[in-house]
Amino acid sequence: MKHFLTFFLFLTMTAAAAHGPVPGRLPPPSALVQVGLTDSDTTAGGTARLCEQVTFSRGLRYGESEANVLDVATSATKADTPRPVLLLVTGDSFTGDRAAPELSRQIQDQAMCFAARNGMIGVRVNYRLAPAAAWPAGAADVAAALSWVHGNIDLFNGDAREIVAVGYGAGAFHVATLLAHPELQTAGADVAGIVLVSGVYRVGKDASDSEKAYLGTDATQYDKRSVFPGILNVDVPIVLAWAADDSAGLVAQGETLKKTLCGAGHCPRSTLLRSRDGIASAFGLDGSGDSLAEPTLLLVRQLEARGLP
């Protein structure tokens, strides 16, 4: 279990990116590894230790907006075969994270490093925030980032056939929305599996200010902008989770999504987290257990075992 708890530190990230034409193919990785990489990137707290033998390529553009960037983390240990890709899309709300930016960056760097050190390529996507970017900007940003990954991740020895998109909080809605709305999907925006954590999937008349900032104030549009019924057509493996201390509304969102998927014959692997009082508790990094580490690791290994040509 300790291995699983350690593994799952990779499951978290940040928010802010944009929709626009996907930049052309990148030059070879040797021209990329220095982008945005400074001496201070891995010196805060335990990050330096965790990020030993991990290389960051930062601020890589996948669209037109200044926010339209992503980071890639890779292990210095060379692999004989391409590695699975963890595409991380998170956010406390549709309008931004509550955590202090520097603290959030350190935790996200640690997450990326654990992904890299556990046989994967970590990709952290920034996406645009409400109210400046309203629905469906978040999902469109995820689509653009995925197109970039499909076109460039081989430069980092990543396998575009084994992309698992991890959506946390607002990021869960963006990932699910993309898959549920074919009109938002672009060439090369497909994934092999998804992990949805403590997300809102259908907003009602009691929408929060953050939800209204992204989805608009016209409640008659909310059903059209939800993940239903399109999510029922998703045919990739799904891991679904929410926390025991999530609000009653969030728990109901997760339970409803699970029940609906199971009723459609596509029952997701699900986990009830013991706590989501901070990232460490949510992912079992504090030793509390009941984290998403094990089911997510099993999903990744399942994809690797498919033996696609």
Image (tube, grey):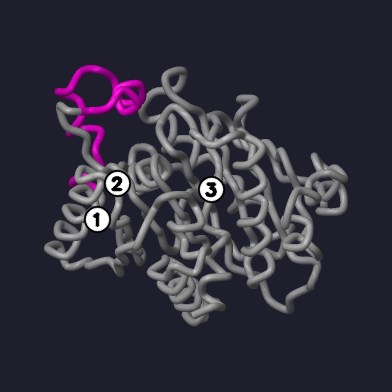
Residue 146 numbered mark, or none? 3
Instruction: Tell me the kind of residue under disc 3.
Output: Leu
| Amino acid type at mark 2 | Ala
Task: Write the start and end of the magenta stretch as one range.
Answer: 207-230
Crowd class of label 2 (few under 14; some 14 to 19; many from 20; radius 10 Å): many
Amino acid on which disc 1 is placed = Asn
Front-most of residues 245 and 296? 245
The residue sitting at 22% across, 67% down in the picture is 267
Position of 204 with respect to 83 (left or right) is left
Label 1: how many Cα within 10 Å (few below 14, some 14–19, many 20+): some
**58, 32: nearer the viewer:** 58
Q: Quadrant of residue 174?
A: top left
Q: CA distance from mark 3 to mark 2?
A: 15 Å
For the residue carrying disc 3, how many other residues have a C-alpha within 10 Å: few (<14), some (14-19), or many (20+)? many
**Label 3: which secondary element:** helix
User: Considering the numbered disc 2 on the image, is that residue within a helix, a strand or a loop?
Assistant: helix
- According to the picture, the residue beneath numbered tag 1 turns out to be 233
Quick check: marks 1 and 2 in contact, CB under 8 Å?
yes
Is the C terminus in the top left, top right, bottom left or bottom right quadrant?
Answer: bottom right
